[in-house]
Image: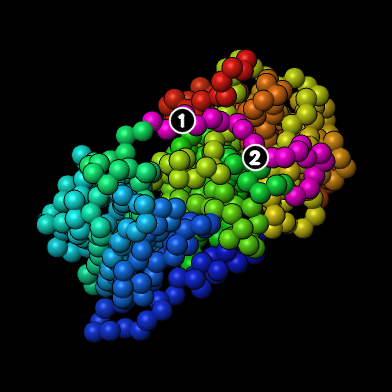
Amino acid sequence: MRSVVTQILEHLRTKMQPQVPFLKGIIFCLVTIYCVHGADVILSCEDSVGLNALGDNDRYVIQSHDFSMSQFYDGPQRCSYKVRKQGRCSQMRLNCPTFELEESDNCTRDFVRIRGQDFDFSDDVNLNNGRLCGTVDIIEVFSTGRWFNLTFKTNRRNNNFNGFQCFISCADNLPSTTQGPVTETPEPCKCGETNRMSRIQGGENTQVNEYPWQTLVQIITSATNAYFCGGSLISDRHVLTSAHCFLTPNLNLTHSVSTLSAFGLHDLQDLDITTSLFALDKMVTLHPDYNELTLDNDFAIVELKGPINFSDFPNIRPICLPVPGHELPLGSEAITTGWGATGGASNSILQAATVSTISSSDCQQELQYTITNNMMCAESTVGGQGPCSGDQGGPMISNEANENYYELVGVSSFGPGCTVPEAPFVYSNVSAALDWILSEIGTPSCERPLNLT
């Protein structure tokens, strides 16, 4: 799958080329929304020529150059945008879940400047003459005025900062005389619920966003070189994947690499088919007892730089973690997903395959490899349908505990895979690492569906 990731990077790079030439030493950068796909409106620097009208159902996304490629922004750059509400839109909302610029006194170097009418900022936002700089966890701004202007400017120095990403939308149906932010309470999100019309049997293409926790963890080693592993979203800011993805003969966590987690993807060759989100990763934590030789405790938790707002991305949801003390019985059916999950060549469309759990002794005898208590094995229920290259770190899920939602029971670790399709595959046992996972992520951000055992 290396070639597919390279195609994605090249696609992103093509989309993000500056569209206007140098002018007096300032790059008029293309600030792109390519980090997000779907019904969002693309704003480039060329859109600073006039007003951008914001309707009731519109959403603009503005972000610093190369943000979706997990690269540091460079300088000098300057972009300016003016947004005006129209129609029944009574209040505009600016939300920046990721904001990391160079910090300076009075924000005189790199900054985002916000100007407009009737602003209401969130309590943790400190402005310097209308400018924002440094690192802020979440920025939220509301305006009942008719317009506001956002300018991004950097100096000539290159810095090791990731930049920013902001969403501009119309707040929900507030009367024109209402001041301040929307206070309605959103419905709590649910984990483990699929988006499907029917159950897949065997191995085949999934439905669009059928498994909303599926994650593509991209490890970017250079501007043209990257590879990926699978992963599972387990909270609004944590992804569970395999430790060995980050410790290969040519790569370890002490090297200078960037990681990027992508959510909502379906077809890697058609990124516009669904609303997808590329999120910068803050840190990667390996299981403290991970054994690089035996692959025992092959777990890693990727923490995002900021939480995902599930209200903004209804097609992205976490998978439920197992109930403490519950183990998947032998012979249970489960589902494994990935972009190579049905054997042979890699697939551009997310695949799903049905597998059945087998005993550790049978697995050990067939693979001639030590299977520990922190591992579990499964084999395909349909010949040749099993995890392949690029699926490592991806989920094995089951609704055995409750048919109304899925739990993450295994993380794809190792096995012959596509080379010996009839052989079992080894998964890291999530139940065995549950205490460590919860100690790292805290209380899960989404509830199990209600009225279920």
Which secondary structure, mark 1?
loop
Instruction: For marks 2 and 1, give the one nearer the viewer.
Output: 1
Q: Residue at x 69, y 58 (%)?
A: 348
Percent across and percent down for residue 135 are 26, 49
Magenta extent: 185-205
Q: Which residue is mark 2?
A: 195
Give the numbered dot on residue 187. 1
Q: Identify the residue at image location x=64%, y=36%.
A: 194
Q: Is residue 187 magenta?
A: yes
Report the amino acid beneath label 1.
Answer: Glu
Per the model, the C-alpha gap separating discs 2 and 1 is 18 Å
Counting from the top left corner in percent of width and height, residue 183 is at: 32, 34
Quarter of the image for residue 268 reads bottom right
Q: Is residue 17 magenta?
A: no
Q: Secondary structure at mark 2?
A: loop
Name the residue type under label 2: Asn
Q: Specify whether residue 237 is in view.
A: yes
Q: Which residue is at 59% across, 17% downward?
A: 451
